[in-house]
Image (cartoon, rainbow, N blue to C red):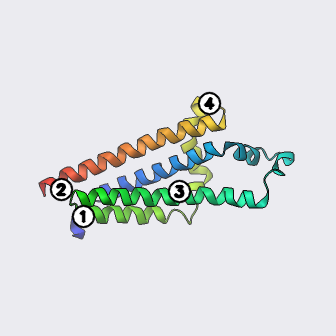
């Protein structure tokens, strides 16, 4: 069974997981753009509007949205692969999930370097934070979904011939 694992599928599924999680993060930033504007501009007068409880809830919310999105995408893919009777695909998705899950503790999703590249798409079209994040979220969600769809289609197609 381990010999049938396709590294290409694991890498592509991991990449699609990462892009979908970045897009969920961008949607969350767009939804909470007023708070991000206050934090990014560090206007002392407006920071008083954010109390400690609100700020901690605000920061935890981003983490939980990404984690729950990862789990939901993982479960959806696994259901699809079980429905198509793809046993090796189940293990490939599990490995991809574990690889992406281990990116959470090292701060990969909140790193300035990775966010700078991801935000570049929105920066091209607008200066407004909400619009930038919506454009980046839609773009990366589309790219991640297309990669995932092609990978699943390729896995299902290869499974039919095995």
User: Up-down: is 110 above or below 43?
Assistant: below
Q: Give how far apart the Cα atoms at labels 4 and 2 are.
A: 44 Å
Q: Give how far apart the Cα atoms at labels 4 and 1 are.
A: 44 Å
Q: Give how far apart the Cα atoms at labels 2 and 1 are.
A: 9 Å
Question: CB atoms at circles 3 and 1 under 8 Å apart?
Answer: no
Of labels 4 and 3, earlier in sequence is 3
**Relative image position of residue 58 (x, y in whole percent):** 68, 56
Q: Give how far apart the Cα atoms at labels 3 and 1 are.
A: 26 Å
**Relative image position of residue 102 (x, y in whole percent):** 49, 66
Q: Is residue 5 visible?
A: no
Picture residue at 46% right of the left edge, 43% below the top: 141
Of labels 2 and 1, earlier in sequence is 1
Who is closer to the viewer here, 56 or 4? 56
Question: CB atoms at circles 4 and 1 under 8 Å apart?
Answer: no
- The residue to which callout 4 is attached is 126
Q: Mark 4 or 3, which is nearer the eye? A: 3
Of labels 4 and 2, earlier in sequence is 4
- The residue to which callout 2 is attached is 159
The quadrant holding residue 13 is: bottom left
- The residue to which callout 3 is attached is 66
Question: CB atoms at circles 2 and 1 under 8 Å apart?
Answer: yes
Question: CB atoms at circles 4 and 2 under 8 Å apart?
Answer: no
Label 4 secondary element: loop
Q: Which image quadrant: the N terminus?
A: bottom left
Picture residue at 39% right of the left edge, 59% below the top: 74
Q: Is residue 105 visible?
A: yes
- The residue to which callout 1 is attached is 88
């Amino acid at each position: 069974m381990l010999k049938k694992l396709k590294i290409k599928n694991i890498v592509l599924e991991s990449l699609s997981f990462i892009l979908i999680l970045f897009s969920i993060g961008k949607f969350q930033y767009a939804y909470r753009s007023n708070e991000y504007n206050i934090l990014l501009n560090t206007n002392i007068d407006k920071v008083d509007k954010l109390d400690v409880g609100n700020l901690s809830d605000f920061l935890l919310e981003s983490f939980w949205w990404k984690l729950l999105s990862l789990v939901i995408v993982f479960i959806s893919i696994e259901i699809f692969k079980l429905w198509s009777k793809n046993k090796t695909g189940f293990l490939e998705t599990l490995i991809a999930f574990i690889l992406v899950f281990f990116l959470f503790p090292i701060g990969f999703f909140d790193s300035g370097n990775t966010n700078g590249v991801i935000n570049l798409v929105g920066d091209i079209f607008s200066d407004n934070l909400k619009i930038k994040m919506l454009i980046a979220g839609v773009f990366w969600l589309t790219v991640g979904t297309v990669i995932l769809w092609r990978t699943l289609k390729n896995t299902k197609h290869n499974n039919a011939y095995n």
